[in-house]
Image (cartoon, coloured by chain):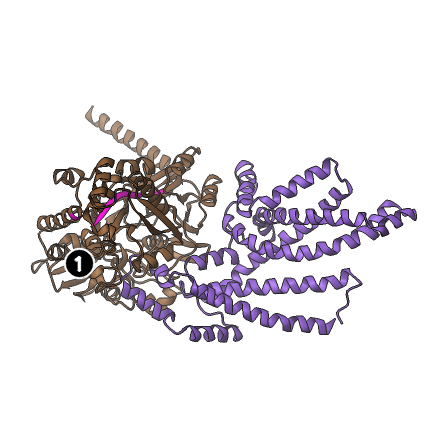
């Protein structure tokens, strides 16, 4: 009896298995070519240690690996990538030793066969990332030394101990953490490598047509298994209407969208098209220039804060935005403040127009005042400024806007031209956010390392520096939160919203993971991404 | 004729030289920094400064200018500030797409524009004239990018007849035509609108001339009057307009390439402008300026063939 039952069960399992695998095979489209159009004129550089724009990072993300990686679709989780596991630090947090996976193959290039990635490549890559002449992220690797321990282990020694929260992003699949194999870049030179990247990732470089496209082919030797997609075509299409029409006509499978609720709603009405709205997006923060007469008065800054309605912003931007209460986005990074924390400290600055008008009157501006700000032509900036303009008008503050092109805006705001500066950015951790926007060294024009401290504030240097060397995660987070409470108390800046990323795709595209957030700032394409029938 | 040609070519040299100088200065006077554009806002000041040095942007302006001119004389357009690839090879791959687009736009637009112009003039104040006038008015008013999107919506989305993205493979004639049809139609419709109006008004003017009345009074057949006396004289001003609007059309091709996501000099120029890629931008401007000078020259020379009164002594 039992034998019969066992035989029947096995037979059923086999039938279901065969049926299920048949279904799997059937549901895949025959042509596994994914065409994705990005909002760009052309690539800038595909050297991961130089790439800084979303379109460049998208390709870099498919071609290269880090020692560890942000889990695809969820940046709150790290998992091993080229490393066998995420190690525990030794020597009080100063030494991190990574054991490398065996059999990771570097892509073939220019007639050269690929080869197995070893510790020598990894050490070479980090040394390059730390070299300011060859990397835009060298500052992240100051005080670090790299050493190969045999062929399959790399020891990273830090002059000062770092917490895991600050160290791990430096060796993850982002910016300087991407591993560039030594032999191909040495053979080609840095300039040629910009348009002919060679890495270890699931897709490898095939073709670049300037101002038009980059074509990647699936890497059959990828260490996680050959990708399901055979080809990925990245198209450069700066015109959103063209991208949209390309998607609707079926010539594109995925397009970068517009961060506007109208666009999301309109494109979503097309049959067979779905919209992905995902984080972490970019923080939208308004920085007050404390050197300007009006804004040097705390009462005026408070009046502006009370005049701004975060809920109004959220309603305007709809699905493309989420709330932001502190410079470090608490939804995605450790060290950010939540609304209840700010509210409890009396620093939430909920909209109150009467209070705003009273504060302005007390500060000597009963009829308000005018100011002029330079903004980018990009809708994401312009629309935020226009909303601010509308909110401030209600309390008598007249904000005049001067629209310039994006690159010009970046140059001008670094020359300290704006009384208030909206900055839209993503930074990998709280330390980078706070250092680059609020440390005195980062003050625009006059700082020791002029960067993006538009407010000229100098009050939280100690807290930033104390937090940076904390190995204990709780203490570190406490310092960051304290620093941001001070920022909120002094009203150095006013965090407005987080703008999420918007992509639209054919419903036949299956990412192969749950898309919540991605540090690559595009809908990641992995070895599991596939196109269904 | 030969000496006139030489004179015109020699005259074109200082014009081109002035344009090159202006282009060189304009792209550098415009605010913005190629190093910032290339590295993005995350890059530190040091990284930006290092890249500026590497790009040669810290050299005095006159040094950059003479390097630019020297390169041009050697036929070396330099390397893109952004992707470090030789600009000449990028232009070489993009130029055929722009050439086929503008040439087909000019040819189709002129051909059909002249035909429609003749038709509307000869059928003045009749249905065909009203339709033709409305058509040319609409064509004059609608910008190229809007017309392009409209055509895409009708022919690509609604009827699924033509592609939306790309320029096709130039070595495949059928594919080239398939990808070229809608962008060329966009430009042709714009060109046609100009030419239709010009041809119509020119013919109407000539129809009132004494010699036309005389020809009719002599008893010549109407077809002969139109062909021998009206058209030959009416087309002379149209010819100059074709030359002038061909130049306008080169401008319209920029947006057409962007809308249709076609490779080409226009798309390349917009990209170079956005990225502050001075080297690429000034090289494309050199090409466009040369084209304008060349078209002007061809137009002037064409007068001689169509108007026997013009002599090039």
Which residues lie in the magenta part? Answer: A490-502
Colour in which chain B is drawn: purple
Q: Position of residue A487 (x, y in %)?
A: 17, 49
Locate residue B299: give its quadrant.
Answer: bottom right
Q: Is A205 positioned to the left or the right of A416 in the image? A: right
Q: Is residue A73 above or below residue B3?
A: above
Q: Is residue A45 visible?
A: no
In the shown orientation, is residue A207 left or right of residue B97? left
Q: Position of residue A76 (x, y in %)?
A: 21, 45
Is residue B198 positioned above or below B265 on the image?
A: above
Secondary structure of the residue carrying numbered label 1: strand
Q: Which residue is mark 1?
A: A98
Quarter of the image for residue A139 reads: bottom left
Q: Is residue A484 magenta?
A: no
- Name the residue at the top extreme: A1
- Could you tell me which residue is drawn at 56 percent across and 37 percent down? B159
Q: Say left or right for A17 vs B308.
A: left
Q: Is residue A151 left or right of residue A266?
A: left
Image coords of residue A251 (percent x, y): 48, 44
Chain A representation colour: brown
């Amino acid at each position: 009896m039992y034998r019969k039952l066992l035989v029947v069960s096995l037979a059923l399992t086999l039938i279901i298995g065969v049926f299920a695998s048949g279904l799997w095979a059937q549901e895949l489209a025959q042509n596994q070519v994914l065409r994705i159009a990005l909002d760009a004129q052309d690539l800038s550089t595909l050297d991961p240690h130089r790439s800084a724009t979303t379109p460049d990072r998208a390709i870099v993300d498919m071609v290269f690996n880090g020692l560890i990686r942000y889990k695809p679709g969820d940046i709150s989780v790290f998992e091993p990538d080229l490393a066998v596991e995420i190690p525990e630090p030794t020597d009080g947090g100063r030494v991190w030793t990574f054991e490398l996976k065996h059999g990771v193959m570097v892509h073939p290039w220019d007639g050269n066969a690929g080869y197995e990635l070893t510790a020598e490549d990894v050490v070479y890559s980090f040394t390059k990332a730390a070299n300011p002449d060859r990397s835009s992220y060298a500052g992240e690797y100051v005080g670090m030394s790299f050493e190969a321990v045999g062929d399959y282990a790399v020891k990273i020694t830090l002059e000062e101990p770092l917490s895991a929260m600050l160290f791990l992003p430096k060796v993850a699949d982002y910016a300087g953490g991407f591993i560039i194999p030594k032999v191909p870049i040495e053979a080609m030179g840095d300039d040629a490598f910009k348009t002919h990247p060679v890495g270890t990732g699931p897709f490898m470089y095939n073709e670049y047509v300037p101002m038009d496209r980059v074509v990647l082919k699936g890497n059959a030797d990828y260490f996680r298994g050959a990708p399901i997609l055979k080809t990925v075509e990245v198209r450069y299409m700066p015109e959103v209407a063209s991208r949209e029409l390309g998607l609707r006509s079926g010539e594109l499978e995925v397009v970068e969208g517009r961060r506007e609720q109208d666009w999301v709603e309109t494109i979503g009405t097309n049959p067979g098209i779905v919209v992905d709205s995902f984080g972490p997006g970019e923080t939208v923060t308004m920085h007050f220039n404390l050197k300007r007469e009006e804004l040097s008065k705390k009462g005026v800054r408070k009046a502006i804060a009370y005049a701004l309605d975060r809920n109004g912003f959220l309603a305007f931007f709809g699905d493309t935005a989420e709330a932001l209460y502190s410079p470090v986005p608490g939804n995605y990074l450790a060290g950010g403040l939540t609304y209840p924390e700010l509210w409890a400290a009396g620093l939430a600055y909920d909209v109150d127009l009467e209070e705003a008008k009273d504060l302005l009157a007390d500060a000597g501006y009963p009829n308000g005042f005018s100011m002029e700000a330079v903004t980018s032509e990009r809708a994401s900036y312009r629309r935020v400024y226009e909303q601010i303009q509308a909110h401030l008008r209600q309390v008598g503050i007249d904000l005049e806007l001067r629209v310039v092109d994006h690159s010009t805006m970046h140059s001008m705001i670094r020359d300290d031209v704006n009384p208030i500066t909206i900055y839209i950015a993503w930074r990998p951790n709280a330390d980078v956010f706070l250092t680059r926007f609020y440390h005195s060294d980062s003050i625009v024009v006059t700082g020791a390392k002029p960067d993006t401290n538009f407010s000229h504030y100098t009050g939280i240097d100690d807290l930033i520096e104390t937090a940076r060397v904390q190995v204990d995660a709780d203490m570190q987070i406490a310092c960051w939160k304290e620093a941001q409470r001070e920022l909120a108390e002094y009203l150095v800046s006013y965090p407005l919203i987080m703008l999420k990323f918007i992509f639209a795709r054919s419903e036949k595209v299956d990412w192969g993971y749950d898309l919540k957030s991605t540090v690559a700032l595009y809908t990641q394409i992995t070895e599991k991404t596939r196109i269904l029938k | 004729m030969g000496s006139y040609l030489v004179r015109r070519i020699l005259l074109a040299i200082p014009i081109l030289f002035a344009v090159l100088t202006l282009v060189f200065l304009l792209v550098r006077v415009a605010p913005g920094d190629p190093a910032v554009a290339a590295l993005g806002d995350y890059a530190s000041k040091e990284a930006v400064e290092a890249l500026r040095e590497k790009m040669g942007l810290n050299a005095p302006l006159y040094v950059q200018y003479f390097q630019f001119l020297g390169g041009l004389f050697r036929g070396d357009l330099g390397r893109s500030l952004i992707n470090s690839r030789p600009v000449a090879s990028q232009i070489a791959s993009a130029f055929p797409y722009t050439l086929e687009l503008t040439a087909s736009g000019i040819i189709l637009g002129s051909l059909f524009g002249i035909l429609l112009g003749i038709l509307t003039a000869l059928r003045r104040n009749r249905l065909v004239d009203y339709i033709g006038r409305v058509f040319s008015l609409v064509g004059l008013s609608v910008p190229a990018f809007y017309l392009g999107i409209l055509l895409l919506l009708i022919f690509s989305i609604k009827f699924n007849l033509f592609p939306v993205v790309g320029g096709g493979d130039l070595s495949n004639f059928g594919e080239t035509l398939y990808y070229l049809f809608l962008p060329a139609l966009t430009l042709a419709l714009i060109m046609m609108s100009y030419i239709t109006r010009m041809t119509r008004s020119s013919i109407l003017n000539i129809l009132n001339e004494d010699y036309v009345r005389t020809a009719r009074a002599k008893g010549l057949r109407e077809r002969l009057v139109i062909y021998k006396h009206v058209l030959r004289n009416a087309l002379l001003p149209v010819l100059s307009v074709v030359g002038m609007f061909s130049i306008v059309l080169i401008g319209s091709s920029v947006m057409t390439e962007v809308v249709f996501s076609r490779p080409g000099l226009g798309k390349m120029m917009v990209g170079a402008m956005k990225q502050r890629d001075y080297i690429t931008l000034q090289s494309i401007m050199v090409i466009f300026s040369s084209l304008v000078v060349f078209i002007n020259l061809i137009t002037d020379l064409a007068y001689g063939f169509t108007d026997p009164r013009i002599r090039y002594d």
